[in-house]
Image: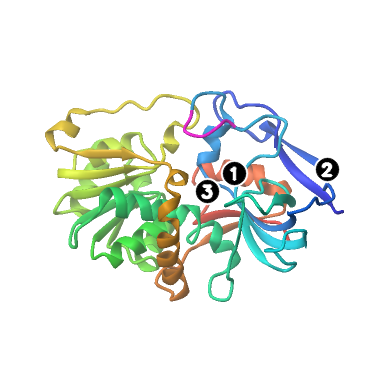
Amino acid sequence: MPTNKQIHLDNRPEGEATASNFKLVTAETPPLADNQVLVRHHFMSLDPYMRGRMNDSKSYTANQPTGAVFQGGTAGEVVESKHPKFQVGDKVVGFGGWQQYSVVDGSVPGSLKKVDTSHVALSHYLGAVGMPGVTAWYGLVKIIAPKEGETVVITAASGAVGSAFGALAKARGCRVVGIAGGPDKCKYVVEELGFDACIDYKQHPDVKSLSAALKEACPDGIDGYFENVGGYIFDAVMLRLNAFARIAMCGMIAGYDGAPLPLANPALFLINRVKLEGFIVSEHMEIWPEALAELGGLVGTGKLKPRESIAEGIEAAPEAFLGLLKGKNFGKQLVKLI
């Protein structure tokens, strides 16, 4: 059996996460039992939600245990199988974690899924046609539920969730405005993803400036908002919301280091009769087939052109993850293992 390099959470961060919170470990992969499958990972997914799991505080998912493989999505290939439904060579996605190989019980529902790579690249099943894409779909379709002609806004617009959100919203006839960091990301959001406008928050470092930019980009106000960040950006958006606006709250990356994120003017929720709903996409598995079908079609036909940031080798995972938390990635952040 092959030697398996793994990244463990060695200790919990105090404030900002650092590379010293992680540890590279080498382990032996165990022999397979009946119904088990050995998967060689081609790609590992790095996602902002992972930062919250590093803490030892209450969160919407279980805390990441210390001294164990750091958990996360993976895409790879079956290299050995003792399960009748999985054959050597099958391309699969699962939750194998930060390691080169995983042993999976193929009889557990949802533990491993075969994917078709003839029209959609394997890596996209961790991004646009995976959890991030379904996250965008649920927030837009089930919470914001836009009508044709309405204006919707999303933060982290150039990322895996944001890019899928843009394509889905344009397909529904919306005016779509993104918020991203830096001119290159904003150019990509407008020119390649097809957003109607994109605001560079780095050029608008306070509520007043950003709110003015939003007023220009959203002359008819904001009907739907997909929240990934929090902080002063949320405050600025609140000032531009229309009556009966809907907010899908997916992440608050500005607060992942543990500091509270106060809201400047919560009375606006009442004044504008705003609907705000937080959600965890894994709690809504019933919508995944419909969402993935639409997302796969958008990618396969070129209507959604996801961008990826690729770190090479498992040793690069911690620094790539820390860079993701600071917005250094461009599109979906992955680690390529082979």
The region drawn magenta spans 59-63
User: Is residue 60 on the magenta stretch?
Assistant: yes
Mark before the other along the chain sequence, 3 or 1: 1
Spatial CA span between label 3 and label 1: 9 Å
Label 1: element kind: helix
Residue 243 appears in the rendering: yes
Quadrant in the rendering for residue 43: bottom right
* Residue type indicated by callout 2: Ala
Image quadrant where one finds the C terminus: bottom right
Label 2: element kind: strand
* Residue type indicated by callout 1: Phe
Instruction: Name above or below for residue 224 compared with residue 113.
Output: above
Q: Residue beneath label 1, please?
A: 321
Task: Give the image location of residue 308, x and y in percent.
Answer: 54, 60
Task: Give the image location of residue 129, x and y in percent.
Answer: 49, 61
Q: Residue beneath label 3, please?
A: 328
Nearer mark to the viewer, of 2 and 1: 2
User: Is residue 153 on the magenta stretch?
Assistant: no
Mark before the other along the chain sequence, 2 or 1: 2
Residue 199 appears in the rendering: no
* Residue type indicated by callout 3: Lys
Q: Residue beneath label 2, please?
A: 27
Disc 2 and disc 1 in contact, CB within 8 angstroms: no
* Residue farthest right in this picture: 1
Nearer mark to the viewer, of 3 and 1: 1
